[in-house]
Image (spheres, rainbow, N blue to C red):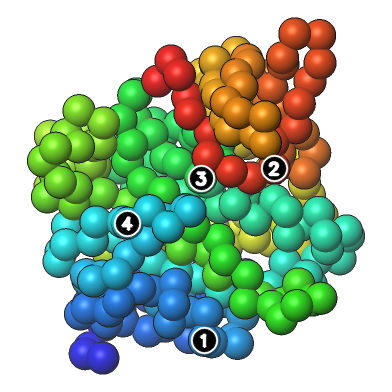
Amino acid sequence: MRSNPFDDALTRVRPRLGRLATSFHFFPSIGSTNDYALSLVTEGAVVVADAQTAGRGRRGHTWFSPPGSGLYVSVVLTPARARIDARRATSLVTIMAGVALAEGIGQATGLEVSLKWPNDLFVARRKLGGILAESSGTAGSIGAVTVGYGINVSATAFPRELSDRATSLESELGREVDRSHVLAETLAALAERYDDLLAGRFDAILDGWREKAAALRGAFVSWTTADGVVSGQTVGIDLDGALLVRRGDAIERIVAGEVNWMDR
């Protein structure tokens, strides 16, 4: 590891970080920040890399992570410590992180970020970032959860062939963006929403998500089941963060899997 280029920005927000970033690990390059974070046991540990050689998203997708172009961050959380309903707190980790990141980016840049279930950050119709939550608990236990997130800061943070589907902070704002400031504000927002999670303030998290994802209510989606590809219209999320989709007269609950947003 080399000296941490984010030190000054983190020092400025230290009173707002609570449990987060008391253990901070910076790498010029690493395979995956999530992989390294999964080996840690310290609640609030933060891993940041300037580049990843094996970054990944959900369901084995590759996350393009070139040097100096984005934020590649992983944070170790322990939602099982929640004072009220640890199971539910754990199920809402990704939802909580999405709300926090949208709020933190807004605070740092003024940009309005929307959320798409379960783990994507969008501006208008283009993807700005994503979240990958992975459990490091052993079988039969909840254990720690590593929340990894990637945010495109400059246009070089995504391949040119994705330019019609991806965007970056600098592309949207038309100016340079200080990655350190965005990191500090997203971690501060994550610390605040993590406190909500541990205190059982689940309604505040769900209300925040619904506000940031309001444009997706009523969207048409498809997904694969044992019987083939089916489709329906979204009606929101439930109290555990599962996606609710109307198919005919029935409401189906989608907990995991690949969802295709047909009108986005």
Side of 28 where 224 appears, left or right: right
As measured in the structure, the alpha-carbon distance from the residue carrying label 2 to the one carrying label 1 is 26 Å
Q: Report the residue marked by disc 3.
A: 119
Numbered mark located on residue 39 in the image: 1
The reply to whether residue 179 is visible in this rendering is: no
The residue carrying pointer 1 sits among few (fewer than 14), some (14 to 19) or many (20 or more) residues within 10 Å by Cα, namely: few
Q: Residue furthest top?
A: 248
Numbered mark located on residue 255 in the image: 2
Of badges 2 and 1, the one in the foreground is 2
Of badges 4 and 1, the one in the foreground is 4
Residue 96, above or below 83: above
The residue under the point 62% across, 15% down is 233
For the residue marked with disc 2, what is the amino acid? Val
Residue 17, above or below 112: below
Q: Which quarter of the rendering shows the C terminus?
A: top left
Q: Disc 2 or 1, which lies upstream in sequence?
A: 1
SS class of the residue under badge 3?
A: loop
